[in-house]
Each structure stands twice: as structure tokens, then as C-alpha cells.
Image (cartoon, rainbow, N blue to C red):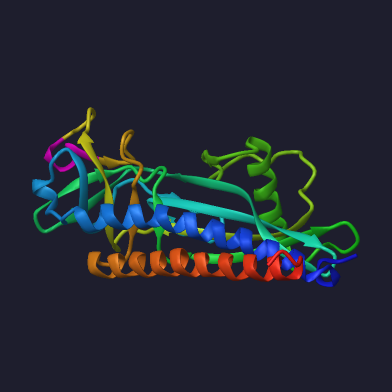
Amino acid sequence: MTLASTDPAVWMIFGFGFGLFSFFRGFKIYREYRVVEDTPQAPLRSVAMGLVSVRGTASGAEQVTSPVSRTTCCYYRVEIEKWQSDGRSGHWKHYRTHAGGVRFLLTDPSGSALVDASGAELDFEPTCERRAKNTLFFGIGGDTGELELLNYITRVSAVTTTGPVTLGLADGSPSVDLPLVHGSFRLKEFCIVPGRNYTITGTCTENPEARDEHDRNLILKGLNEPTYLISEKPLAALESRLRGRVVLMVFGGGALSAVCLGLLLVRLHLW
């Protein structure tokens, strides 16, 4: 029996659960929105220690090459999803996350600061999206590019089973003699690219390895404040986007849960 042919009550339960998830997820985003809204944007030259909001241009003498699109960047993150099928229906489910890169300078007209993007939430469009499949009956689809992607996914899978991987798999990593992963995969790659402007809300600390006044401040994910957001949008546009997501997830999720619960109670003759 497939999901499409099951009792409508299953969809009501699914909608109720999804609505609750969106509702509580919305409050998490609301907290992030308030942090961004309450943290005034400051010139890099005058940032204080603690939570800061800054905007500038990324640059750096050291750069890396991203593993999927081969983009020259300061930092990349690849979100890998795997297709989960249930009869006639299915969905993409998170499979692995692979991240890597180097610290880079964020510069505005007043000065600069060093940035460690590890652990940041990246709020911009993917640099690229690719798909690859290796199925039991149909084998590897497409061209040799898919084989390269499957090899990459296999190496990432061999390193870890949970959480982000921060290893140099992008450049010059040796080939591994492992059986290729099976299934259909979707890869979304996000890159922080030199020359682009970014708005960063994160924690500023003193850089213990500073070489000059340009990198004496280090912006990273704080130990006490979890908010760490890197966006290509200016601050006003970022606040507007977060506010819209809060309204959609809190009110939309709450409404969906309430409707599905009501329909379920009526169907079960409990109301």
C-alpha cells in the first residue's frame, strides 16, 4: 500500500505534525530576527567585543576551490540530500553536510576584520545545484560528471555519519577504494566568494594570532550567543526577510496544525 492510497487521516496527522514543526521553528527564527534587529550595524574599525553586525567585502590571500562547482572561494558548504521513496511518493532528506575553507578579511571603508565562517548560517542562493544517481537496476545516470559527484559523496560518507565535515576533500584529495554510494542525490553548494559584499551578525573576539591592525578582530560563532548569520542582503532587506519567515511559519504553521487537528477529530467522530 502506498502513501497516496492510505487513509486521509494519515495526511491530517502529517499536516498537524508539520504545522507544529513550522510553528516552533518560527519562534527560533523570531529570536534570530530580534538579535539582528537589536544589533546596530557598526563600521568595522569601531566594532566592540561581543555580538556585532557588520557589512563589507570579502577578500583574502588564501582561497580554496569548492568541491562541486570548482569555484574559487573563501568558504564553502555543500548540503547533500538523498531521495527517500515510499511507493509512489517520496521526498528529499538531509544526508550529509560538508564544509571547508579558510579565514578571510571583511573590509569596509573604515577598516577590516578577520572572519571564521565555520558554523555560520549562510543566507544566500546556492552557487550551484547538481544531482547524481547510482541505482541498483539502472546504474549511474548521466555523464562522467555524475561519477565524480558520486565519488565525492562516497568520500564524505566515509569520513562521518553525522554533523558537518570540515576537511580538505576539495583539493587534491587521494582517491579512495570504496564502493560507490547507492541512491539519488541532490547537492546544493554555497560559497563565500572574494569581491562580494556580505552582512555578518556574529561574535567579535580578539584575534590571538593577529599580524597587524587589519586582523586584530576576529568574527566567529560565539560560545554563549548561537546567532551567526552571513547574508548577501543589506541589513534592512535581511530583517524584512526574517520577519516574513517568522509570520509565515508561526501563523501559517499554527493555522495548518489547527485545521488538520479539527479535521482529524471530525473524522474520528471525537468532535
Residue 62 x, y percent position in the rendering = 34, 45
Q: Can residue 60 be seen in this view?
A: yes
Q: Nearer the viewer, residue 32 or 121?
A: 32
Snapshot quadrant of residue 49: top left
Q: In which quarter of the image is the C terminus?
A: bottom right
Residue 263 x, y percent position in the rendering = 67, 71
Q: Is residue 175 left or right of residue 61?
A: right
Q: Can residue 145 be seen in this view?
A: no
Q: Is 42 above or below relative to 15?
A: above
Asked if residue 215 is among those painted magenta in the image, a careful observer would answer yes
User: Could you tell me which residue is drawn at 56 percent across and 48 percent down?
Assistant: 97
Instruction: Report the span colored magenta.
Output: 212-218
User: Could you tell me which residue is drawn at 28 percent across and 55 percent down?
Assistant: 34
Q: In which quarter of the image is the N terminus?
A: bottom right
Q: In this view, does 180 lie to the left or right of 66?
A: right
Residue 10 x, y percent position in the rendering = 76, 64
